[in-house]
Image: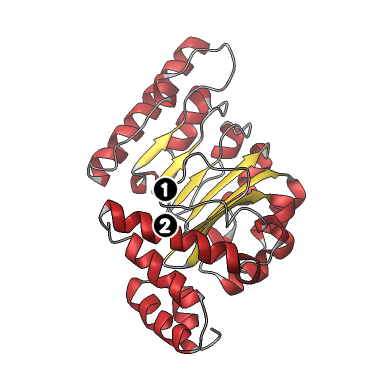
Amino acid sequence: MRGALFAEVLRDPSPEACTVLADQLLEAGDARGELINVELALASRPSPPRRERLSKRRAELVRAHASAWWPWPFAAGTAAARNPFTDGPRPAAALRTRHGFVVGVRCDASAFLPVAADVFAREPVTALELLAIDADGLDELVEAPWLPRLRRLTLRGALGDAGFKALARAPGLRALEALNLPDHGIGVAGLSALGDCLPSLGSLGLTANPLGGPGAGALARWRHLPNLRSLTSPAPRSTAPASPGCSTVASSRRSRSSVSAEIRSATRASWRSASTRAG
């Protein structure tokens, strides 16, 4: 799978490219080709009986070949146990596949980062959720050569304002579309550094961060705020009441201009309210 067609799938795992690659793999006797075809069929919304047969066959293929396809220690036992089309709550570590390839990874940062280069060399990963990330892990992440391939990123840990600044300023995240940073202790100092960072971001999750009115005001001054379709930033886990602008959830079905106007209005209202209370 190291030819030009595989490189194309790494760039964009479209159904068309995956179908052609599946044919080549099946001709070579590679079972990965069947997995691609099975998952393409599952994605086409088959009838319940056919879906059941396809899901069963997918599970058989993954049990037989997962250790060869996805040989990393963190993946042991996760790929075979999880069917992304039917399974419920996510385990601590998981792979999400689409069209026969891994497109999403959820894992402890300490287990993923040492093998990340090989993961991205083999699979078209665009979504990543790292658990328990620390300052050293963040330093490695922001310098990673594969970072520009990500479109969705969730980090769980306690990076604080300094960590948020380093992440937002990473050149490799200029094409990132969704960022989720729950409960990282991010406040006005971190958000004030947004400036021209993260220009492609359409969704930003800041749940349980101590933004307050000043933080909402800093977010309102972010140059690329008009690009956001969704912003979630309720109050942190403290006894302090939520500011009006810190609980905004914008519907992705509305126009970008109306969404950004609502977010900007709400955050500025929160900032003015906080300033009045402080005075």
Indicate the secondary structure of the residue bearing disc 1.
loop
**Residue at position x 40%, y 64% from top?**
39
Task: Using the rendered image of the protein, determine whether residue 47 is visible from the camera's viewpoint.
Answer: yes
Circles 2 and 1, Cβ within 8 Å, touching? The answer is yes
**Residue at position x 44%, y 58% from top?**
56
> Residue 86 has which mark?
1
Residue 44 placement, left or right of 220: left
Q: Amino acid at mark 2?
A: Ser
Residue 60 to residue 243: above or below = below
Q: Earlier in the sequence, mark 2 or mark 1?
A: 2
> Residue 55 has which mark?
2
- Locate residue 157, reporting x and y percent: 67, 38
Task: Using the rendered image of the protein, determine whether residue 13 is visible from the camera's viewpoint.
Answer: no
Residue 237 to residue 126: above or below = above
Q: Amino acid at mark 1?
A: Thr
Residue 200 to residue 261: above or below = below
- Quick one: 136 or 213, which is closer to the camera? 136
Q: CA distance from mark 2 to mark 1?
A: 8 Å
> Residue 193 has which mark?
none
- Locate residue 20, reporting x and y percent: 37, 83
**Residue at position x 73%, y 44% from top?**
134
- Locate residue 227, reporting x and y percent: 35, 49
* Neighbours of disc 1 within 10 Å: few (<14), some (14-19), many (20+): few
